[in-house]
Amino acid sequence: MELVTGRSGKPHITSQQVRQLQQGIFGANACILNTGSMLTPEVQSSNKIRIKDGALMFQGALFTVKVGGYDEVTINNGNQGMKRKDVIAVKYTYDSSRNIESGEWAVVQGTPAASNPAVPSMPVTDGDIQAGDAEVYCPVFVINLDGINVTGVDIIPPMMDDMSTINKYLSELRDKHKSQNKFAASEIDTGETWIDGKKIYRRTYITTDPVSPSNTLTIPISLTGIADTLWIDQQNSFIRSKGGEQVYPLPLPRYSGSNNYVGVWINTAGIRLFSDSSWNQNWEKCITIKYTKK
């Protein structure tokens, strides 16, 4: 075991140790960091690509184009009547004889084809910087050629947001999660979708109004012209005594030796509860509905 972030009286921090830290944070896969111009590519001519300033993280190694500057990479001319895909990659090199590491842009030329040209494979496909491999390639851009013209540049690695942006996303996700787990008579977006792709919304209604054989309880919900598919959320619907000592599901099915069932019927105008026994004001009726919109 070695303390890396501490004084030892001599230079002792290695690039491999720094990569250990960065790979633990960013992962081993390539990503473009949210800094500078984020390595934005610009087509300068039929065989020259300008890459603006930015930074790439790959296997814990940081590769950069100087702030405010740019690199220019030259590709071979295309062929009339043919299409081709070239790859601009970052090439990592380790010279073990001199213990020197370096990084540079490298062009891997594809094979011309009349249509649907393939993206070329890297000369080394499974290189590992941390293992001490002599060469490791990281594909960054795919250059699309049609005849002698460059028709577009595709960026391969994703862009990694900075921590402030990630924290903002997490905060918004937490707030959304809290909202989706609320129960209220007002409309709640559950974050779910129905089989037709429409959003699912939820409302919860609570009443102590009585229900009995002579009194069907109607709770207005006013979703006519709004709701498309509508149903009772049985997982979150129940009837309970005011003190909470007794709780029954809704709908409450008839069970052996008892007539204390409670039926629930719903349409876009209201919820109706009916029973062949009496449930007075000492019983709280809680009904949750879910629905999609037209």
Image: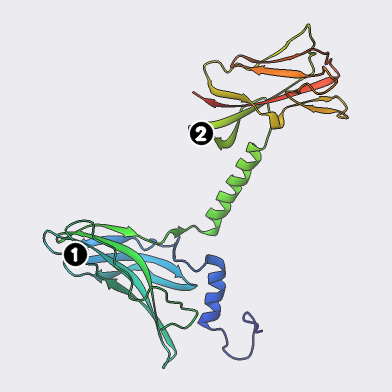
| Rendered image quadrant of residue 33 | bottom left
Q: Secondary structure at mark 1?
A: loop
Per the rendering, the mark at residue 195 is 2
293 sits left or right of 288 in the view: left
Q: Residues within 10 Å of mark 1 (few under 14, many from 20)?
A: many
163 to the left or right of 261 = left
Q: Tell me the amino acid under the disc marked 2.
A: Ile
Where is residue 264 shown, x and y percent of the image? 70, 19
Comparing 7 with 85, the one in front is 85
- Tell me where residue 232 appears, x and y as whole percent: 65, 25
The type of residue carrying mark 1 is Pro
Q: Choose the circle earlier in sequence order: 1 or 2.
A: 1
Q: What is the distance, in whole Å, between disc 1 and disc 2 at their CAs?
A: 45 Å
Give the quadrant of the N terminus: bottom right
Q: Disc 1 marks which residue?
A: 112
Nearer to us of marks 1 and 2 is 2
The structure residue drawn at horizontal position 52% and vertical position 81%, both measured from the top left corner, is 16
Crowding around mark 2 (Cα neighbors within 10 Å: few <14, some 14 to 19, many 20+) is: few
Q: Position of residue 5 (x, y in %)?
A: 63, 79
How many numbered discs, if any?
2
Picture residue at 85% right of the left edge, 24% below the top:
241
- Quadrant in which residue 8 is drawn: bottom right
